[in-house]
Amino acid sequence: MATDTTSSRRFGDLESPIVDADFHLTEQVSDLVPYVERPWRELFIGHNPFDESAEFFDPFPSAGIMEPHITTGRAEIFSPDAVRSADDVEAGMELLGVDLPVVTPGAVMLSVSLVHHDEVAAALARACNSFVLDRIVDETRDVYGTITIAGQKPRLAADEIDDRADESGMIGVYLPTGGLNPPLGDERYDPIYEACERAGLPLLMHGVGSGTMKSFPVQYEGFSRGMENHVIAHPFQHMVNLVSLVVQGVPERFDVDFVFQEAGIGWIPYLMYRLDNEYYARRDDAPMLSRRPSEYMTDDFYYTTQPLEGSQNAPEYVCAMARLMNAPECLLWSSDYPHHDFDHTNEIYRVFAREFERPALERIFGTNAHEVLFE
Amino acid sequence: MTRTTDRSHHVIAASELQPGQRVLTEIRGREVGVFNVDGQYYAIGNYCPHMGGPCAEGLVTGMFDADDRGDVSFTRDGEILCCPWHGWQFDLKTGDHLGHSKLRVLTYDVFEEDGELYVRM
Ligand code: FES
């Protein structure tokens, strides 16, 4: 059940549909377990001695990070019941003024690549896809989903992509990256890229706050507040995976669109210029590349906007970053609804409208995502 | 007798708004929340300066604060309004955001006359 819809679209006259490239479910363990297939299902039918209120054992590791605006109940919209049906998705579309949401898991499944049992992780991803197809996807209402995979066993992830590739309601492959080691340029992940290429689907990558405890355990140990962790969790996970993908030549070897979600935008021009700088000095360290790293970053990679840092107090910063990363070519508007830090379409449109004319705005708010995900 | 004039808008009988309670109303097309905080009345616009969320419908609570040594306490319980969209916090008495000096929610004067509450707008 979504909160009431006090606000919807209040801006410009874009002719292209507004696509939201990161719109979340709040799926719970109890939604998934009925869809877990045998034999792994047997692991979930006993009781949970660690939490008497829980119906099932919770296999998703959490770093136990306390976010005060969530745990005190202040950010009410981010509740366990926020988005668990197609009706809930529609309520969110209305609240945001969005025409086409790209629906991705946004609760327990964000941590699927942290699950400490590789086959169970793959089984949970499969269960999630069954749940999404059964209960969420509804093409007649413009509600589309994504094929979630777990990164632990790339071969199983590839099987899952192959299995679901013909579902017209599934428009991308969604890899929660939190906790994955080694980073994504490693050849062990090649089966995932091969499967994406076969299916003609983009790969969406999404970090998670708890991922820090496994991806950056030393740093995580030193934090004692949620804010310290949250501000670096998403961009750090992406920066590590992005440099690994580029330097090891993955975009040279596979014809796949890579989408980095939920890390804002300032880190993108920073990494573009930094990588190019290195490349000029030692091209021999990245011999697979036939172009400058920044060209892969804007030609083969895409980025979602939220949480758009600076939108409240430094719109000129946002516009400068967007210009430097060639946003009309590679930036996709996203809300992250119903998470505690979701962006609202009206607000973000206002910021970008300072810098860009209508054709570029149409690309950022819909056409780019439409090309990557729906065509 | 209740009266609504050009600038004074009747909201509710004071006896129906007890400490800790709120009422939502609409005045000149604007949604306004009227709150009773320990016997004092405050009116605040239901439009969050962050992204337009319905802030007057959110939780009323207190805030964490720390002294010079870093010892943390929970203070001003009942005086802090939280927007339900992202949980941003505002001082119910002034409308000021707790962490952003330039952001505030619109506030309005409330007065009581003959046991009735009015908002000036
Ligand atoms: S809209 Fe009120 S906190 Fe964001």
Image (spheres, coloured by chain):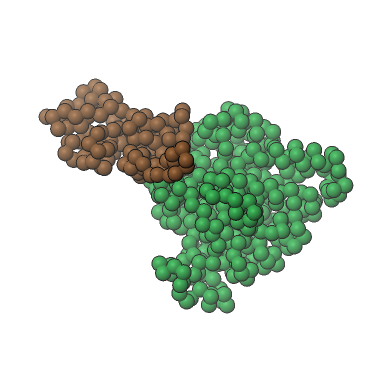
Chain colours: A green, B brown
Residue found at the far left of this picture: B1
- Residue at x 69% of width, y 47% of height: A239
Q: Report whether A225 appears left or right of A294.
A: left
Percent across and percent down for residue A42 are 53, 77
Residue found at the far top of this picture: B6
Q: Quadrant of the N terminus of chain A?
A: bottom left
Number of marks in the rendered image: 0
Q: Nearer the viewer, residue A71 or A344?
A: A71
- Residue at x 30% of width, y 36% of height: B33
Residue found at the far right of this picture: A284
Q: Nearer the viewer, residue A160 or A81?
A: A81
Percent across and percent down for residue B58 are 36, 43
Q: Report whether A243 appears left or right of A82.
A: right
- Residue at x 40% of width, y 49% of height: A73
- Residue at x 79% of width, y 49% of height: A247
The reply to whether residue A21 is visible in this rendering is no
In the image, residue B100 above or below residue A330: above
Percent across and percent down for residue B11 are 22, 33
Q: Nearer the viewer, residue A329 or A55?
A: A55
The reply to whether residue A317 is visible in this rendering is yes
In the image, residue A42 above or below residue B44: below
Percent across and percent down for residue A29 are 49, 65
